[in-house]
Image (cartoon, helix red, strand yellow):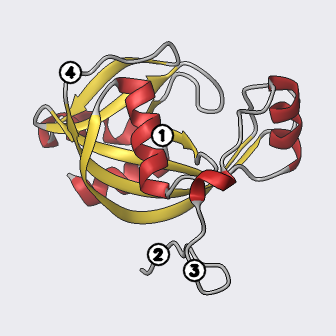
Amino acid sequence: MIFREYNLEGGGNVDLSRLRANRMSLPNYSLAHQHLPIVCHDVFIRYGGGVLLVVRDNHPHKGELWPLGGRIERGFSTEDSLRMIVRRESRLELEDISMIGSIRIFAGTDPFSHGKGTDCPAFVYSATGIGKLRLDSLHKDPTIVTPERYDKIRDSLHPYVRDFMDLLI
């Protein structure tokens, strides 16, 4: 699998900070979410002797064990965006980031109740988490999945989570 980010324009590097934008207002983001695929990244974090999964407290996939991640931040490399989101969601720093695949999730639910569901192509990573875990308000019930625990919960996981956990455990 090849994944590269090219920072080129007219033979030189693009100043990524020029591409950054303030976050959209919720009504505007809801409209974008309703009409466009939202490109995301998720990370399966090695932490505490296993792989960290958390329970999502928002749609889509509310109430399910899931890796941390979310929408790629405009104007940042994918890995820098992933670091920022994980820091915001969990206070963890990431090391040894490695892309392990890509997916596209279609969900009938969405976080804005616009009724059009969610369409998210995503880059999937593994990494090592460093620091003391402290989740934000959109995530709860951190679960460190060891090989022994994985055998007990495997069948209850979303197929996406299960497929990548099968690779990692």
Which numbered tag is attached to residue 12?
3
Q: Is residue 21 left or right of residue 103?
A: right
**Which amino acid type is shown beneath numbered disc 3?**
Gly
- Residue 154 image position (x, y, % from top left): 32, 41
Q: Nearer the viewer, residue 19 or 135?
A: 19
Q: Note whether 132 is above or below 115 in the view shown.
A: above
Whole-number angstrom distance, CA of label 4 to CA of label 1: 18 Å
Image position of 119 (left or right of 75): right
Q: Quick one: label 1, few (<14), some, or many (20+) residues within 10 Å?
A: many
Under circle 3, the secondary element is loop
Q: Which mark is residue 3?
A: 2
Task: Give the foreground label among 4 and 1.
Answer: 4
Kindly report the distance in space between the C-alpha atoms of the residues bearing marks 3 and 2: 20 Å
Find out whether the residues at labels 4 and 2 contact each other: C-beta distance under 8 Å.
no
In the rendered structure, which disc, 4 or 3, sits on the residue that comes first in sequence?
3
Q: Measure the C-alpha gap from mark 3 to mark 1.
A: 31 Å
Please rate how many residues cluster around mark 2, counting C-alpha atoms within 10 Å: few if below 14, some from 14 to 19, many from 20.
Answer: few
Q: Residue at x 71, y 35 (%)?
A: 22
